Image (tube, rainbow, N blue to C red):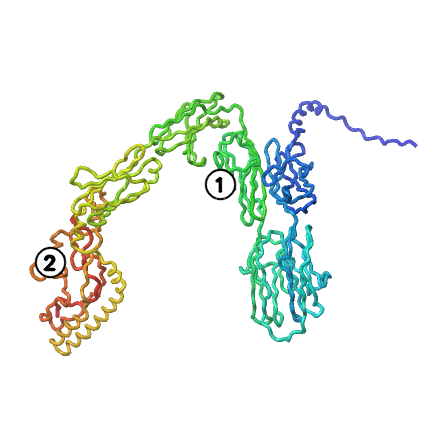
Amino acid sequence: MAVQRAASPRRPPAPRWPRLLLPLLLPLLLLLLPAPSEGLGHSAELAFAVEPSDDVAVPGQPIVLDCKVEGTPPVRITWRKNGVELPESTHSTLLANGSLMIHHFRLERGGSPSDEGDYECVAQNRFGLVVSRKARIQAATMSDFHVHPQATVGEEGGVARFQCQIHGLPEPLITWEKNRVPIDTDNERYTLLPKGVLQITGLRAEDSGIFHCVASNIASIRISHGARLTVSGSGSGAYKEPAILVGPENLTLTVHQTAVLECVATGNPRPIVSWSRLDGRPIGVEGIQVLGTGNLIISDVTVQHSGVYVCAANRPGTRVRRTAQGRLVVQAPAEFVQHPQSISRPAGTTAMFTCQAQGEPPPHVTWLKNGQVLGPGGHVRLKNNNSTLTISGIGPEDEAIYQCVAENSAGSSQASARLTVLWAEGLPGPPRNVQAVSVSSTEVRVSWSEPLANTKEIIGYVLHIRKAADPPELEYQEAVSKSTFQHLVSDLEPSTAYSFYIKAYTPRGASSASVPTLASTLGEAPAPPPLSVRVLGSSSLQLLWEPWPRLAQHEGGFKLFYRPASKTSFTGPILLPGTVSSYNLSQLDPTAVYEVKLLAYNQHGDGNATVRFVSLRGASERTALSPPCDCRKEEAANQTSTTGIVIGIHIGVTCIIFCVLFLLFGQRGRVLLCKDVENQLSPPQGPRSQRDPGILALNGARRGERGQLGRDEKHVDMKELEQLFPPAGAAGQPDPRPTQDPAAPAPCEETQLSTLPLQGCGLMEGKTAEATAPCAGLAAAPPPPDRGPGLLGEGQTARPAEARVTQPAHSEQ
């Protein structure tokens, strides 16, 4: 039977204008469609889809290290072991997807190399080269037990604990056997912890037996020594204080691992075990469980779980508790918060990559350029703990793939980005014949010739300047007009080498840099050094100035001259290195005025000198007139000043009492008694002392220095000295004490008592006992007038500290 097709509905004829426009639209469509280039179906950026990871291999067995790369083909893949490219051999094979297969993993035996190490997958295409993260490959091992379980005796209802320890790669799985039969893990009284601990709670008689620890991994199986558990009769039921048999240990783990914090407590009644954090933060509930009677298990740990954990055993119904604590440290491998981004920049400009990584401990960041370590130097700068890479003045040689590698003790990670240098057509070439000539100690003249080609669009030049010893980031620029082919660079440092290069600029971009040229500024003699003079004694001076270490770099130092002002010739020069800052002159004439001159010099000659005039005459006279200050007595006086005040108060009170007695028993008796008491209580006078002589600068000092001398020093002439210190040969018996001012009140013991009225003995109103430092100025004498630079600086003598009862010279009724 024939099957007839249903007649399709008639369609209206298609318009003719699309047919006419098709030849015009076809080229446009071809431009919009992706070209069937070699990159079709591939990512243009060269990057890793799968990177190798750390692994453990069984000796003699095969192992595959994964690696998968995306990017514009053709892509060439190689492998490195410990930073060295692996050669082709029959021992390993590079698979088609880029993975590496080691047929028989081997350890180092008989001179053959071990396959253990750090492996990296390396991929390269025409745009650059990238390196994968490091994958550490280790051989599976199993050591012997270094802790075997020990025999234990426990009471019924009590707690027993066995422990074994063994090292292995990968981490061994620990199980337990009782009487050579695996224990029943479904028994709630038996708690197995991953680190090789077996806890048995609520002991019963049937728990007695011999227990073995069994450790196994892909490398081997080990069985420990047997340990016997003996369960005695039931306990006495007497009260026992809560106690923690085993507390938590300090642990260091990596994120996503499981933390086991052990806590075994005993007591009667059985204590309640609880956990807390030492910092008061909540432990949380997600991934947290309590195993057995008090072991804390934290699954899938994170950095936030780091801290100190406290196990507490509480006696029920009371506040009696015992605690133990352990620290948990969780490390996190490096991971990127901000990846570097591929960029395109015109030639001669600056390219910048930023890479932010985090981890615990904080990762260290390094940069690679086409797989090679990239350090700072030249036009490459690293800032912000290597998180920012800056490349200035980029050129075709800088076009590459740059990788940021972040690494810490928990692992490493890498991210890559590509730099494309855009080179505009018609840019001028680099300026030619760049020369730099020193003009002075602070100026250099730089000249050049215009580029050979494409010079019509030049709008100007930029001169790049920096010290030859400085890093590129300290470079600075100066703009120059297009019609100028020389430039005077000023404000430079003397005797310093500078680097110069030039670029020509157009509206479309900058030319490549010219060849750098070096020039050193001319040298100059040093400036006058600041100089101060200190008088050490009647025949010695100390000269002080600032050291100039740079003088030693330029074959320089200091020259010192001195002479008595009355002579024409100097003694010197005394040559001193630039690192010296002082010099002492001794065996000088005590009666002379000396002229001292200090200058700095280098290979360019001598600088201007600094001149000082110093007199030793005043120092010698002061030394002859008064002995040096007795500093030990001064310290003793300072230490006893408080005691002197107390004694002075007692003396004052005593004097008042005796004065009252004088009024009661008569004038004669009161006067005699006051005299007697005062003579007994007044301390003897101490020796005079002298302050250190100051520095006397007669000439060459600054006005401010002379003004300071006028304010700080008291000058007296020879007549005043004779009044203050009468010579031993004066007529009559010499008075060892300074002459009193007639206007000052006389002390009690120096007043004629026969001339006093009945109320003449009393306390001086407003006066208290004073403790005067031995080296202070004389309190009773008025300050001498300022006579300018004279014979004597500071140093008037004074009596030592004393507490005494004083009398007024006369009293008004």
Quarter of the figure with residue 27? top right
**Is label 2 in a helix, a strand or a loop?**
loop
Q: Position of residue 325 (x, y in %)?
A: 56, 62
The residue lying toward the viewer, choosing from 260 and 381, is 260
Q: Residue at x 16, y 70 (%)?
A: 679
Quarter of the figure with residue 328? bottom right
> How busy is the neighbourhood of tag 2: few (under 14 within 10 Å), some, or many (20 plus)?
few
Q: Nearer the viewer, mark 1 or mark 2?
A: 2
Q: Position of residue 281 (x, y in %)?
A: 55, 59
Cα–Cα gap, marks 1 and 2: 80 Å
Q: Position of residue 329 (x, y in %)?
A: 56, 54
> How busy is the neighbourhood of tag 1: few (under 14 within 10 Å), some, or many (20 plus)?
few
Q: Is the residue 50 above or below the residue 677 in the image?
A: above
- In the image, is 649 to the left or to the right of 30? left
Marks 1 and 2 close (CB-CB < 8 Å): no
**Most extreme residue toward the bottom, as rendered?**
665
Specify the quadrant that holds the C terminus: bottom left
Does any portion of residue 735 appear in the rendered image? yes
Q: Which residue is mark 2?
A: 728
Q: Residue at x 65, y 26 (%)?
A: 28
The residue lying toward the viewer, choosing from 346 and 241, is 241
Q: Amino acid at mark 2?
A: Ala
Q: Which residue is mark 1?
A: 383
**Is label 1 in a helix, a strand or a loop?**
strand
The residue lying toward the viewer, choosing from 311 and 250, is 250
- In the image, is 434 to the left or to the right of 71? left
Q: Is the residue 475 above or below the residue 291 in the image?
A: above
User: How many labels, in total?
Assistant: 2
Q: Earlier in the sequence, mark 1 or mark 2?
A: 1
Q: Position of residue 454 (x, y in %)?
A: 49, 21
